[in-house]
Image (cartoon, rainbow, N blue to C red):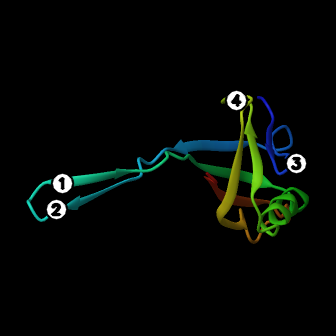
Amino acid sequence: MADKVLGGVTLAGTFTIALSVHMPKPVEKARMSDGSFRWAFFPEYRIWSLNWTKLTKAQLDVLIAREALNQILTWVNNDESATSYNVVITDFSYDSVDPISTTKLYKATMTLDEAI
């Protein structure tokens, strides 16, 4: 599995990531006074959904530190291509895998929106 790098920190190779990419088509449609439609087209952008399972506390802390930066980060998913993207973390959540277990493992979800 190739490395995935977010803001200069390698994420893959340390723990497993389930990855999905969404590419919404940003368009707007408006009806004109003569009944016709006018369309506005905007640049396409990508949304990545990252899901981790069985993170240690140290691995979770890496993600928390990335989320706390509140800035545009560089995202490289070498499984997809070597292209780097400017992204913003728009959603992040985590929870204990098994709250009563002594292993203290966590699951996390992060959403990255391409900053264009």
Residue 1 sits above or below residue 12 on the image:
above
| Residue at the extreme right | 58
* Amino acid marked by disc 1: Phe
Report the Cα–Cα distance between label 2 and label 3: 49 Å
Residue 108 sits above or below residue 12 on the image:
below
- Which one is earlier in the sequence, the residue at label 4 or at label 2? 2
Residue in the image at 82% along x and 45% along y: 11
Report the Cα–Cα distance between label 1 and label 3: 46 Å
Which residue, given by chain and number where applicable, does mark 1 sit on?
37
Residue 41 placement (x, y as % from top left) = 38, 49
Q: Is residue 98 left or right of residue 115?
A: right
Q: Are marks 1 and 2 in contact (CB under 8 Å)?
A: yes
- Which one is earlier in the sequence, the residue at label 4 or at label 3? 3
Residue in the image at 80% along x and 55% along y: 55
* Amino acid marked by disc 3: Val
* Amino acid marked by disc 4: Asp
- Which one is earlier in the sequence, the residue at label 4 or at label 1? 1
- Which one is earlier in the sequence, the residue at label 1 or at label 3? 3
Q: Secondary structure at mark 4?
A: loop
